[in-house]
Each structure stands twice: as C-alpha cells, then as structure tokens.
Image (cartoon, helix red, strand yellow):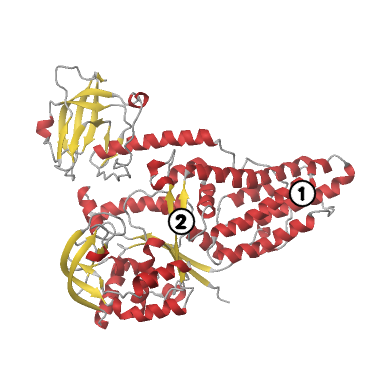
C-alpha cells in the first residue's frame, strides 16, 4: 500500500541580512510537523528556501559593490548553515534564482497572459521598496508605508497586471464554505472584512525600473514582479511545468503553508487566485502564526537580549532553543522573546523536570540494582494513575499536533513529566530500598519510571531531535521499543543493556550571572557592529520613542577606557579591487605597521591619503572586508543630510603610536 503523503512549506525567506531567533520560528515549527508526520509513517515533503529577486536586492548589492547574485549567494549560504545547525529536515531548498524555477515562472506568466488573466497597462502610485509593495494614496499612513512605516517612492511605469478582481467572488465563497482554509479563524475574518468584501484591485505583476528578476519571455524589458515569482515556488519546487513533474503529481496540493501573519494576505488571496487561474487545486490550509517579538520590541531594549540563534545554541544547546520556541507561545498568537524567559524555561521545564527525572531514575536503577531492573516486580498504590496518564498522552499529543498547536502538545507531554516526578515522591524508592522485602516493589517502581521516560522520550522527538538519543543511551532503550506507535502502549520497555547514568541532560543555569554575561556580550556586539558600519557598511539605525537612535546609550568611563585610540600615519593607500567604497591603508603606529580597510573611497583618493596623521582604534578585533583583513578602524565624522565625511586628524607633531586620551 502506498504511504500517505504530507506536504508542508514555510515562506521562502528574503535574504536581507543576518537572521535572528525570530526568523527561526516558522522553520522550527514546520520541521517539528514534518518530523511528527514521518514518525507516523507519512511520505513527507518539507520545503523551504529563499526569495532572491527584486529592487531592494539590486540596490543593496550595488551599494556593496557586488552583483545581486554574489550578494544573495553569501547570505543564502549562511541561511543553509543555520538550518543545518538547527537540524531542520527540509527535503528541498528552493532558490528563486534556480534555473528550473525561473523557467517554470516564465511558463506560468505566459500561460496566464495567454488566458487573458494578465494584461499590459501603466501603474502610477506609491511603492515601498523594503516591503516590495504598491500602495494607493489612501492606504498610506502619514504618507508612509502602512506595513513598515518607511518612506515610499512615487512610481509610474508600464506594467503587466493580473486580473485579481476577477476572482473576488470565488475567493469569498472559498472563505465562507471552507472555514478551515485559513487558521487561526481571526485571520480569516481579517481577510474577508479588510480586503475581499471592500473589493479587490488588479495586481501589478511586472516591473521595468529594475532588471534583477525573471525576464518576461515575450517582453524582455519587463521582469516578473515578486508575487508570481515568489509564490510559484510551492509548485515549481515540485517540478510543475518541467520535464519531470512526478513530485507535483504526488504531493500537490500542499497540506499546509506555514506563514507569518504579515503575509497571510498574499497566501490566502493572491496565491489562491493564481491557482484558480491556472486551474490547479488549492492548498488545504494556510496557517498564519503570530510574531515572536523581542522584549521591548527591539534587541537593544532588553538586558542581555542576545538573539543570534548560533550564539544561543552554542550556549544552551539546540533542543533547549527549539523547545522554547515551540513551548513558550501558543502557535498563532504573538509572543515575546527574552533571554530571561528562555533561561527560566530551561531551568523549570528542562533542568528541574525532564533532566532531573532522567538523572534520578538512572541513578536509582544503577545504585539499587546494578543497572538492571529485576524481572520480579510488584505493583502497588499510585501505579494505575501513572499508567493511565502516560498511556493516553500520545493520543492527546496527536490531537494538538494535528491542529498545529505545538505549545499545547508540549504542555500535554510535560503533564506526564510532572506526573512521573510526582510518582517518585509518592512511592519514595529510597525508603523502599532500605528493606529487603520491598525489593520487588522497588523494582516495579523503577520499571514504571523507566517506562514512563521511554514514552516521553518518543513523544518529544518532533520538537527535540537530540535529547531522545541521550535518554535512550542512558536507559538502554532498544530501537524496536521506541517507535511512535509504541508510545501509546504500556509495558514495552525491556533492557538490552544495563542502565548507565550519563551527564546531566540539562544543567541548571544561574539566571543573574547568565544575564550579566549576555549583557556584556551584547555590548561587544554593538561595538563590532559600529566598527563594521564605519568600515563602509550601510547603517540605518531605527529611532525609539524619544527620537534617540537605537543602540545609542550613555556609557561610563570604564566603558570608554576599553577603547584604545592611537596616533597613526598613512604610509601607503590603494583602492580595493571591485569596490567603489573601500580603500586599503598601510599605517605606521609606533613600532608596528597596520593594515586597515575603510569605506572612504568616495571622499578621498589614495594619493591624498598618504602622509595623513589619523586616529586609529587599535584594539578592535580584526575583520575581513572583501577578503582583506582590517586590523583596526580609523575615525571619521559624517553628516548624513549633506553626505559629507571628514577624517579625524591630529594637529601638531605627535609621534605615531601615542595614545589618545
């Protein structure tokens, strides 16, 4: 019999820079669902990827002196490495620059054009480059983009349009007749009341003002605009309109698109309308989850609020981070991330509850029975309630997972963890061990603990890929005893080897000391970021409610004292190859020479730099810019409004290497 299939997708990520922990939220949730379905025996296709075209990418790449493809290649490599670190089990990673995707999008565009659902006209209105969105005058908020609050540009250009308005009535019927199509239901009401019922306008689907995109085959001054390009990935990744569409026939329609709430409109209105126009089945469900926002709304607002997922995984372990993301907030609602909440969750749920349960159980089996529970066991008080709770946990967990309620599913599993810990306190194995006549009862208690942990270890697999193996190793749980199906059965545990207590799975963390360490780490990150910006990277600080740029704060003399400023003289200077911004300088600083790369080529020529006496930040950690090591940073003042920049120079005959204070 052919296995049932399950197709789950995340939105393809826009490669705009370094990912923070919030970006991992959707992907970890999709991975948990994919793992769960595989454990149930489904043939799973899990898709993620990157959306790499558009005006924003082209502009940023030009500012960095690289091609758009070079720019996105570097970022995509980082995304793939992060997903690997987080043990994301995607079956395919699609890039919208993949040739097979480009060709399929061109065929889709032409098919819609031939059908009359795409036509040429002219667009005039307001455009937000960061959001890749067009807005009418009435949709703007205080003259700015209603989504991100940034400035918009007046745009007028020839464009192709998709007849979105043609599908308005069909979309309304879809929403009214299939109440499960959008989840949570609040998103459905929002789409109906705010977009569909007021009336849909046709959609601009091509641009001529930039060329970083999929060319329209029959009108090559146009490139396909973001939505037909990006949204089509869900079917082009399966081989739609290719020479091999086996996966498309096998997995489409998708079982669920997991998306953030900010892009629900595109996935529940534009995407279904495109599929209707192509005469293709619609996805079974679009789930628009809430945002995992940072405490205070911005990274710098919270004490020690480090949000780099790589750093967090290195400090606390992968499973702790995945557990927190899926446990802390009901999926669908907005939640808040803070390091304090993360550490508290690790200490309470993972260290105190699960980790302590495994440690106590393995230690007692080893101490009282040399690692092997005797076959002669007695039942007693409290056993039946424990068995009843643990035997039914799988069913309750599945009910929540089938509804993508990850937090509720973990809550059910942790009820079993708590009940098992309570069982230890009720039966008091340490007291039973004092009398020989209680050994059979003691064996029964320890068997029940081991069996409970076996069930729990199986059920946490979708969420925590590493911890189950650690538990199985310590309790010597055989491979045949850890199938998903066996998690609903009691009495399966049998030992293939002696129990061997191992390292504590989740050590407790000293909250105050850890927050102090994280706060110090955040300070260092800001210093590093500031130095990178001074070396020519674009910096656009947000403003808080006081108007103060984000990241600007008062410091004490002890902080200032950490920065070592020295007098340095420019010995030689040359342009960095293939860069319009960077100069490479050789500096004399006392008895040593330093190489510094600085983003000042638009303001100074190499010839006029030679002989200048400057201020060098000499204790800055070396960094590589365009593959060239920069051993410090030179100081400069800049005025963003006028676009002027001037180097900070030394007035007077001061020896190089002298400290500035």
Quarter of the image for the N terminus: give it: bottom right
| Image quarter of residue 113 | bottom left
Residue indicated by mark 1: 446
Circle 1 SS class: helix
The Cα–Cα distance between marks 1 and 2, rounded to whole angstroms, is 41 Å
Of residues 406 and 72, the one nearer the viewer is 406
Question: Where is residue 278 drawn, in percent x and y?
Answer: 34, 79
| Image quarter of residue 224 | bottom left
Dot 1, crowdedness within 10 Å: few (<14), some or many (≥20)?
A: many
Quarter of the image for the C terminus: give it: top left
Residue at x-position 34% and y-position 37%: 526
Dot 2, crowdedness within 10 Å: few (<14), some or many (≥20)?
A: few
Q: Is residue 309 left or right of residue 440?
A: left
User: Where 356 falls versus 198 (above or below)?
Assistant: above
Residue indicated by mark 2: 334
In the image, which is nearer the foreground, mark 1 or mark 2?
2
User: Where 206 falls versus 559 (above or below)?
Assistant: below
Residue at x-position 34% and y-position 78%: 168
Is residue 467 among the parts visible in the rendering? Answer: yes
- The residue furthest right is 437
- Look at the numbered discs 1 and 2 and tell me whether their residues touch, using CB distance below 8 Å: no
Question: Where is residue 335 drawn, in percent x and y?
Answer: 47, 53
* Tag shown at residue 517: none
């Amino acid at each position: 019999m052919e296995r049932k299939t399950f197709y789950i997708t995340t939105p393809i990520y826009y490669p705009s820079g370094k990912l923070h922990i919030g970006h991992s939220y959707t992907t970890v949730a999709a991975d948990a669902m994919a793992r769960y379905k595989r454990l149930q025996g489904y043939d799973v296709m899990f898709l993620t990827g990157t959306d790499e075209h558009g005006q924003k990418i082209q502009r940023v790449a030009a500012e960095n002196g690289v091609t758009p493809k070079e720019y996105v290649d570097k970022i995509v490599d980082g995304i793939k490495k992060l997903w690997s670190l987080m043990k994301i089990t995607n079956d395919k990673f699609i890039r919208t620059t993949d040739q097979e995707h480009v060709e399929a999008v061109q065929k889709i565009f032409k098919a819609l054009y031939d059908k009359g659902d795409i036509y040429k006209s002219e667009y005039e209105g307001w455009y937000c480059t960061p959001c890749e969105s067009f807005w009418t005058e009435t949709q703007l908020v205080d003259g700015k983009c209603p989504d991100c609050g940034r400035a918009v540009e007046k745009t007028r250009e020839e464009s192709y349009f998709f007849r979105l308005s043609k599908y308005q009535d069909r979309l309304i019927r879809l929403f009214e007749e299939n109440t499960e199509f959008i989840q949570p239901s609040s998103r459905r009401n929002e789409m109906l009341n705010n977009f569909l019922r007021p009336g849909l306008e046709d959609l601009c689907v091509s641009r001529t003002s930039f060329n970083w995109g999929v060319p329209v085959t029959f009108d090559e001054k146009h490139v396909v605009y973001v939505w037909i390009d990006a949204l089509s990935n869900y079917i082009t990744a399966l081989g739609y309109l290719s020479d091999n569409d086996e996966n498309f026939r096998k997995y489409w329609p998708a079982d669920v698109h997991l998306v953030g709430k900010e892009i629900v409109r595109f996935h529940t209105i534009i995407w279904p309308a495109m599929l209707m126009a192509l005469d293709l089945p619609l996805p079974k469900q679009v789930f628009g989850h809430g945002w995992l926002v940072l405490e205070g709304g911005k990274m710098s607002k919270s004490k020690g609020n480090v949000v780099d997922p790589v750093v967090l995984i290195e400090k606390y372990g992968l499973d702790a981070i995945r557990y927190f993301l899926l446990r802390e907030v009901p999926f669908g609602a907005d939640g808040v991330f803070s390091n304090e909440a993360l550490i508290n969750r690790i200490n309470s749920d993972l260290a105190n509850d699960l980790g302590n349960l495994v440690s106590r159980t393995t230690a007692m089996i080893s101490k009282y029975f040399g690692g092997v529970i005797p076959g002669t066991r007695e039942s007693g008080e409290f056993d039946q309630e424990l068995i009843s709770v643990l035997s039914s946990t799988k069913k309750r967990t599945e009910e929540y997972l089938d509804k993508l309620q990850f937090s509720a599913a973990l809550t059910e599993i942790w009820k079993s963890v708590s009940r098992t810990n309570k069982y230890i306190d009720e039966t008091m194995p340490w007291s039973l061990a004092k009398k020989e006549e209680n050994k059979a009862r003691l064996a029964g208690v320890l068997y029940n603990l081991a069996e409970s942990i076996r069930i729990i270890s199986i059920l946490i697999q979708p969420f925590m890929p590493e911890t189950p193996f650690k538990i199985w190793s310590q309790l010597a749980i055989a491979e045949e005893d850890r199938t998903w199906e066996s998690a609903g059965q009691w009495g399966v545990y049998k030992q293939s080897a002696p129990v061997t207590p191992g390292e504590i799975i989740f050590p407790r963390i000293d909250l105050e000391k850890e927050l102090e360490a994280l706060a110090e780490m955040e300070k260092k990150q800001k210093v590093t970021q500031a130095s990178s910006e001074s070396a020519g990277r674009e910096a656009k600080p947000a403003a808080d409610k006081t108007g103060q740029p984000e990241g600007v704060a008062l410091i004490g003399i002890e902080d200032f004292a950490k920065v070592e400023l020295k007098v340095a003289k420019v010995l030689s200077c040359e342009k960095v190859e293939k860069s319009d911004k960077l100069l490479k300088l050789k500096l004399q600083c006392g008895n040593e020479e330093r190489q510094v790369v600085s983003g000042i080529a638009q303001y100074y020529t190499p010839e006029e730099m030679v002989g200048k006496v400057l201020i060098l930040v000499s204790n800055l950690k070396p960094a590589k810019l365009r593959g060239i090591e920069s051993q410090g940073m030179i100081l400069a003042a800049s005025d963003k409004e006028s676009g002027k920049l001037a180097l900070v120079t030394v007035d007077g005959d001061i020896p190089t290497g002298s400290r500035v204070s």
